[in-house]
Amino acid sequence: GQQLNQSPQSMFIQEGEDVSMNCTSSSIFNTWLWYKQDPGEGPVLLIALYKAGELTSNGRLTAQFGITRKDSFLNISASIPSDVGIYFCAGPKVGGANNLFFGTGTRLTVIP
Amino acid sequence: DTAVSQTPKYLVTQMGNDKSIKCEQNLGHDTMYWYKQDSKKFLKIMFSYNNKELIINETVPNRFSPKSPDKAHLNLHINSLELGDSAVYFCASSQEAGQGRGGYTFGSGTRLTVV
């Protein structure tokens, strides 16, 4: 079945450090979305990417739509404690049923 | 006002019982979804409804029955609960069916524990 693999699975970083994570798929996507899930809450949309090669920022977050359309990257600069959570990539599969597939998630822990 | 609200937040019940989870969205979205998040935090689509009509039913046991009385509500009824049903269930909505160009708005989840 469809699977979006995220790496790393988990990260422990010091406050102030930059973070990079990625998401890869065996299928192409026309849209890549990045979500963050805080403990006890539902995922919240951070960034949406709609075009291969696109680079989009939202504050300290920057995401890129890979040119192969099979991957995407999320960077967080100058991490702060509230960045803690699980980050998911997601996208609708091209030619498939109309629903979002979610990645396996990257759990981020920021050490003050 | 909460955009997508689910009730209850927590649900603890015995095996074999029947339970329902309610979901309401006030965003005027046309499509609503149910996702299941397992203990490894993997999110998987269960159902998708567009304007009260079922458009996706992933391989979910028929003990799970979604009901959409109107496009602002999508409830999930589960019969004969099993231990493996324990998970967090998320309701979500979107403006467009699938595609997700505008992203999905999620509720805060219902943690179901079957004992």
Image: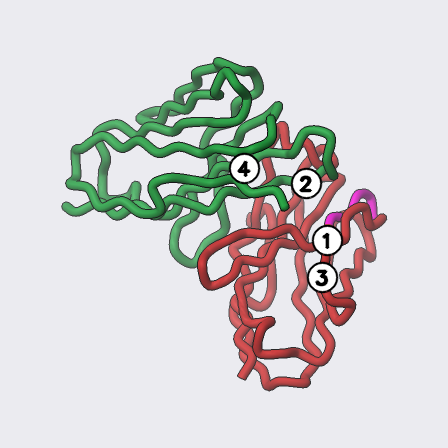
Q: Nearer the viewer, residue A6 or A86?
A: A6
- Both marks 4 and 3 on one chain: no
**Residue B47 image offset from top left, x and y in percent:** 72, 53
Total residue callouts? 4
Look at 72% across and 57% down and name the residue there.
B59
> Do the CB atoms of the residues marked 3 and 1 lie less than 8 Å apart?
yes
Query: Mark 4 to mark 2: distance in Å?
Result: 10 Å
Image marks 1 and 2: residues in contact by CB distance under 8 Å = yes
What is the distance, in whole Å, between disc 3 and disc 2 at their CAs? 15 Å
> Which chain did the renderer colour red?
B
Q: CA distance from mark 4 to mark 3?
A: 21 Å
Q: Which residues are magenta?
A: B48-52
Q: Residue A42, position in %: x, y?
A: 50, 51
Is residue B107 part of the magenta span, yes or no? no
Mark 2 belongs to which amino acid?
Asn
- Helix, strand, or loop for circle 3? loop
The chain carrying label 2 is A
Circle 3 sits on which residue?
Answer: B60
- Mark 1–mark 2 distance (CA, rounded to whole Å): 10 Å
The colour assigned to chain A within the rendered structure: green
Quickly name the residue at label 1: B58
Residue linked to disc 4: A90
Residue A108 lies, in percent from the top left, at: 30, 45
Circle nearer the viewer, 3 or 2: 3
